[in-house]
Amino acid sequence: MSSPIRAAAEALSDTLTAWRRHLHAHPELSGEEAETAAYISAELRRLGYEPREQIAGTHGLTADLLPDPSTAAPATALRADMDALPINEETGAPYASRRPGVMHACGHDAHMAMLLGAAALLAGRRSELRAPVRLIFQPSEERSPGGAAPLVAAGVLDGVADVFGLHIWSQMPVGALGTRVGPFMSATNELRITISGRGGHAAMPQQCVDPIVVAAEVILALQTIVSRSIAMTDSAVVSITQVHGGTAGNVIPETVELRGTIRTLSESVRAIVCARVHELATGVARNYGAAAEVAIRDGYPTVVNDANAVARALAAARAIGIAESDIVTMPPQGGGEDFAYYAQKVPGAFLFLGGRNEAKGCCHPHHHPKFDIDEAALPIGAALLAQVALDRQPG
Ligand code: NI
């Protein structure tokens, strides 16, 4: 509690909690965040901002705060995502979702509340700002192709020097902050393989080309990509997550469909893995007289954190009193994040903010029906975002 910003953020705790609980109770799915956007916009206007709404025809909005007197210095951008998940909430909390089947189970409600908190903290400190601040509220992070790419294409990073994003993290204790320099969140690819054989009577396999046996060989062959085609210093995941085929115990089906996901941390490894999936699936199928049609769809690219941006975020963390022992260098994560598109355009830092508190029952993983966070994280996140913006020097 060593800094004025942190003290001001702690004094704002009730408001931060109210924002978060309102958003939590009224979750909206990816691409459907109309009420969320209207709520955010109204709160920003109440704080004195003039938000730009419906960017690129989405529910995304931005709001700028210019230093006084205004300068031509490039801006610091702060980003929060807005969408919820198709999950039926089971927390039993008084602020639980009022919409059956829709839940803020990843903490994006907290992200919006913290960014509103930063907006409130900065609005009262305009005279201390030496560069503009751009607040970015982004829809549709949970559903590929995501809301970030259209916002970036629409120019939300024009005039921006660097960008910061916070993700609350239920696997890390409240008060802790985790990040890393370099590749942090994985590139994702969705995989679909359709194996076509020749169906028939299960008692006469010699007349058939059994796509079930071919699928089994393909699944095993794919396991060799990570172990045999990727260098020990690189990493990747290839997971087959669905196998669909067959209708009866005595029928060999015509086709089997496999689905799965690929996770990688660099474009070069991503290219190798995708190429090998294609080669192995088609090659194995051909060996058995079957055919494999491989469709690999690009998800988000790798989130690559910039060293200077991470340094700036950690300096801000120390400035608001986060202890050195609470700053964690995390390993690269298997999850994907469309923050990647911002960090491709300008130097960026994506950070995880601890939200775990077992005593309060906040310990379930993200995307779980009982997911919840310790709201004591909210003022820490709001202070951190505000401090990053205040620390920016002109030029
Ligand atoms: Ni999330």
Image (cartoon, rainbow, N blue to C red):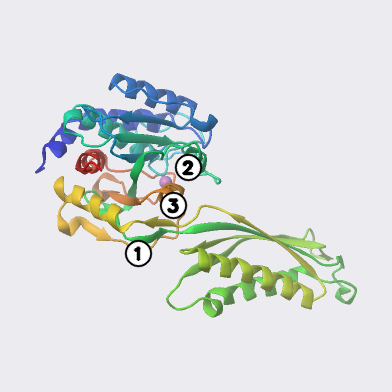
Frontmost of labels 2 and 3 is 3
Residue 328 position within the rendered picture, expressed as x and y whole percent measured from the top left: 25, 59
Amino acid type, residue under disc 1 in the picture: Pro
Tell whether label 3 touches label 1 (CB within 8 Å).
Answer: no
**Reading the chain from its start, which is encountered first: label 1 or label 3?**
1
**Helix, strand or loop under label 2:** helix
Q: Is residue 76 left or right of residue 196?
A: left
Q: Which residue is mark 2?
A: 148
Tell whether label 3 touches label 2 (CB within 8 Å).
Answer: no
Residue 217 position within the rendered picture, expressed as x and y whole percent measured from the top left: 69, 75
Residue 87 position within the rendered picture, expressed as x and y whole percent measured from the top left: 50, 41
**Helix, strand or loop under label 1:** loop
Residue 179 numbered tag: none
| Residue 11 visible in image | yes
Q: Is residue 127 above or below residue 146?
A: above
Frontmost of labels 2 and 1 is 2
How would you rate the neighbour count of disc 3 (Cα within 10 Å): few for under 14, some for 14-19, many for 20 or more? some
Task: Identify the image quadrant of residue 63.
Answer: top left
Q: Is residue 240 left or right of residue 202?
A: left
- How far, Cα to Cα, is label 2 from label 1? 24 Å
Q: Which residue is mark 3?
A: 344
How would you rate the neighbour count of disc 1 (Cα within 10 Å): few for under 14, some for 14-19, many for 20 or more? few
Task: Identify the image quadrant of residue 159.
Answer: top left
Residue at 52% x, 32% y is 56
**Reading the chain from its start, which is encountered first: label 2 or label 1?**
2
Q: Quadrant of the C terminus?
A: top left
Q: Which residue is mark 1?
A: 331
Amino acid type, residue under disc 2 in the picture: Ala
Q: Is residue 347 above or below residue 385?
A: below
**Helix, strand or loop under label 3:** helix
Amino acid type, residue under disc 3 in the picture: Gln
